[in-house]
Image (cartoon, rainbow, N blue to C red):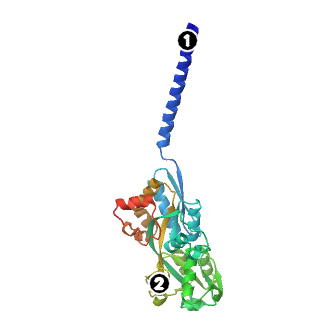
Amino acid sequence: MKKNLSLLLAMILIVSLVGGCSSGGDDTNGDAGSKPENIFISIATGGTGGTYYPLGGAIAKIFNENVEGVTANAQSTGASVENINLLSQGEAEVGFVQNDVTYYAWTGTETFQDKEKVTNIRGMAMLYPEVIQIIATKDSGIKSVEDLKGKKVAVGAPGSGTEVNARQILAEYGITYDDLGKADYLSFNEASDQLKNEQIDAAFVTAAIPTSAVTEVTQTADIVLVSLDKDKIESLKEKYPFYTEVTIPKDSYRNQTEDVVAAAVMAMLIVPEDLDEDLVYNMTKSIFENRQVIIDTHDKGNDIKLETALEGMPIDLHPGAEKYYVEQGIK
């Protein structure tokens, strides 16, 4: 009996020791789990010659330096429409998009007509006006939108917001792609190269002023900026409330001697619906608290302001972003 009792006590001691070690292991794992995990954030931007790409790089820098546990990277894409698809399919975490295209995706209209509505995205911040610029070579003789008939025109990359803008503006003048000599679906950089080589006569570019791709063209080629008629902009606004009338000031580009009337939409940031609330809160906060990094990268950073971060927001806000704006008194 003494022998059996000794064996029993020994077994109890072993079980206690094993349990204690197991418990200690759980505590250690719990401590490790409390540390921020490494989260990769892909920021979907646009072509490298546009405004989205350098701004995306600046925001990635802000995230990497100010949001603990995050590794961010700016990804060159076909811009708005492609970015919405990337986020909705879980292939990117932050996306630059035009607010009009965001609304089309949300409501299943225009570019997203006859497709399933994209409702698993949320708003993060409104950024700055994006101007629809119509750039033509001086030798083409193009001075008005009507003059685009029969010409070779770059209408934007496939799936881009620029292409949507080009189609809608042309429609206001009763022009379809069939009326053009050729409609080329080119990115900003491709359009820039072909304008310089006179392979195309004109190009639509929706981006902040000045746009690097357009500035590059002006260094080696003579161009003209085509003005829109004010009544056409008003009719555009009646159909599509995202458009506004803006002026491209003279001297925005080399040899631009006059102001140019143009239409504009707004650039914005979107995130997936299911992205962690605290993460989105911290990313939103870091953007506005480190805005100087964006300003140092591109002049459009001056237009990104906390007080206008919700103006023109076309879809529901992400709860993480909303939490930050509520704290700051932004409605």
Residue at the spot x=51%, y=56% of the render? 275
Which of the two labelled residues, at mark 1 and mark 2, occupies the earlier sequence position? 1
As drawn, the label of residue 102 is none
Mark 1, residues whose alpha carbon is within 10 Å: few (<14), some, or many (≥20)?
few
Q: Quadrant of the N terminus?
A: top right
135 on left or right of 177: left
Residue at the spot x=48%, y=47% of the render? 36
Residue pointed to by mark 2: 238
SS assignment at label 2:
helix
Q: Residue 228 appears at what percent x and percent y?
A: 49, 87
Any part of residue 289 in sight? no
Q: Residue 280 appears at what percent x and percent y?
A: 46, 57
Residue pointed to by mark 1: 6
Q: Determine the image quadrant of residue 167.
A: bottom right
268 on left or right of 156: left
Any part of residue 285 in sight? yes
Residue at the spot x=46%, y=54% of the render? 279
C-alpha span from label 1 to label 2: 92 Å
Q: Between 163 and 260, which is closer to the camera in this rendering?
A: 163
